Image (tube, helix red, strand yellow):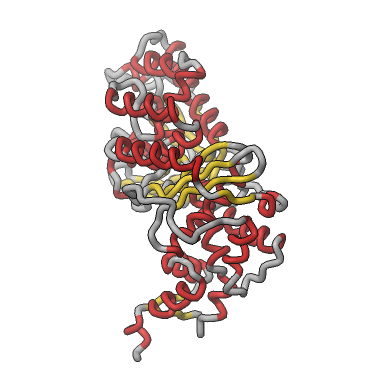
Amino acid sequence: MVETVEFRVTWPTAPPPATGYPLLDDTLGRLKIKIGDTKVATRYRTDNNNEGDELLLPTYELAEWIVANWWPLLYEPRKREDYLDDPDYRSRHWLGAARRGFALPNLWLCPAGDKIEITGSAAQLRFARLQFLDDVDETAIDTAIVCRALRGFVERVLRRLEERGQHATPLHEAWRAICDTDPQAEEYCRLIGALGLSPYEDNPEIDADLDRVCGRLDRALVEDLCQVANEETFASLAERTVAIAATLDAAPVADLGALLAAELPPDRHPDAWQWGNVAARQVRRRLHISDTDPAGGGQFLAALGLDTASPLGIIPRPEEIKGGLRRQNDDRMRVALFEEQRPQRRFTAARAAFLAWAHGGPGDRLMTAAITRPQQASRAFAAELLAPQAFIRTRAANRLLSDPAIQDIAQLLDAPAGAVKYQAQNAHIRVVASHGWGL
């Protein structure tokens, strides 16, 4: 795992040329963004073949963008897989949004729970007559580490301004508001940031709904809600979350003992799905379940006493939230499942087991569609337990499967067809429509 990120800036020794914009003139510096020990996101080549890894630009604009988006930048996960096409999310998490006419790399900072996933790609900037040379493979770094790097950069720019006699810029004012945030207010700021909003702007309807759920729900449950919702969906998803929490007292009880006997592997993989996959394999070994046994998923659910026979009830179901769980002090948990089809309930129940395991103690959680590390890992965990890649390989001739074959495997495994298809593709099995077989 990569454990360092730097936004390093140095100042030229010669006085910068005057442009008439003191904020820009006084913060002209050389910026180098380094991820880990070797990857430099700012490495470039100009049109006349000069190469370097430090960008000469006014750093005020970048510092201002970081501060304006501080809470979403650190705590707003991706809400959809096609986030690249979401202009609002792009404006808060894509470094290119801070270019303002100057060259910055094609770099994304996407929160994913307690880590931030940084990714980027080479890019040709015609207006700047240079090309950024390196892709940045998706890298998960602890949020605290990224926060320190961004904070250090902003404070260095502020010190530079003060050295040049500027002590009351808009950047100073905005940064002071962040630094003066007390621990209780910071919890609110994180939740609002997770929704993609600024706590320094008026959000009266959101605030009212948030106050209501914070007064009634477990802290982790509210966090899960904010990580999957946005400004438009928050009210309806909050209503559903309250309804789910109300059912947990009467939800069926499962015993986590068989799961807790296996040590949870740490989240130290580049991709969250790898974490879930490794955890599933470890649990299967602990329970002596073969990865080629089509009944293996059922054996896992039975070992925990997870009841998936019927839904707990009917609650209007937005796709973003699948169910809820309550882990108790005695290593038992209650799971609320609402999906009509049993394969989906089995999948969500397996997800609940992973989230309760990863949560590490008593509390409530949601199973959601959020793109955070725990939620992503829970989906991979459930997929590997209910639809093991090793078993799917035994059904694939020449590493090919048709869509009807996927459906047949899903029926045999009592697993969602989408999970089977996902597992087949991760096992490097090509899934084709039936007409693609030339039959």
Q: Nearer the viewer, residue 36 or 325?
A: 325
Can you see residue 246? yes
Q: In the rendered view, does 23 fall on the left or right side of 430? A: left
Q: Which residue is nearer to you in this view: 302 or 207?
A: 302
Q: Position of residue 404 (x, y in %)?
A: 39, 79
Is the residue 307 above or below the residue 65 in the image?
below
Q: Residue furthest front?
A: 250
Q: Position of residue 32 (x, y in %)?
A: 49, 35
Q: Residue at x 51, y 72 (%)?
A: 413
Residue 429 horizontal side relative to residue 63, left or right:
right
Q: Can residue 274 be seen by looking at this rendering? A: no
Q: Where is residue 3 shown, x and y percent of the image? A: 61, 40
Taking depth in this image into account, of 305 and 202 the one nearest to the observer is: 305
Is 124 situated above or below 411? above
Report x, y in % for residue 134.
Answer: 47, 51
Q: Nearer the viewer, residue 391 or 177?
A: 391
Q: Note whether 162 is above or below 254 in the view shown.
A: above
Horizontally, residue 39 falls left or right of residue 210, namely right
Locate the C terminus by quadrant: bottom left
- Count of labels in the image: 0
In the figure, is residue 249 to the left or right of 322?
Answer: right
The answer to which image quadrant residue 109 occupies is top left
At 66% across and 58% down in the image, what residue appears?
Answer: 283
Spot the residue most to the bottom. 439
Residue at 60% of width from left, 37% of height from top? 362
Q: Is residue 408 above or below residue 73?
A: below
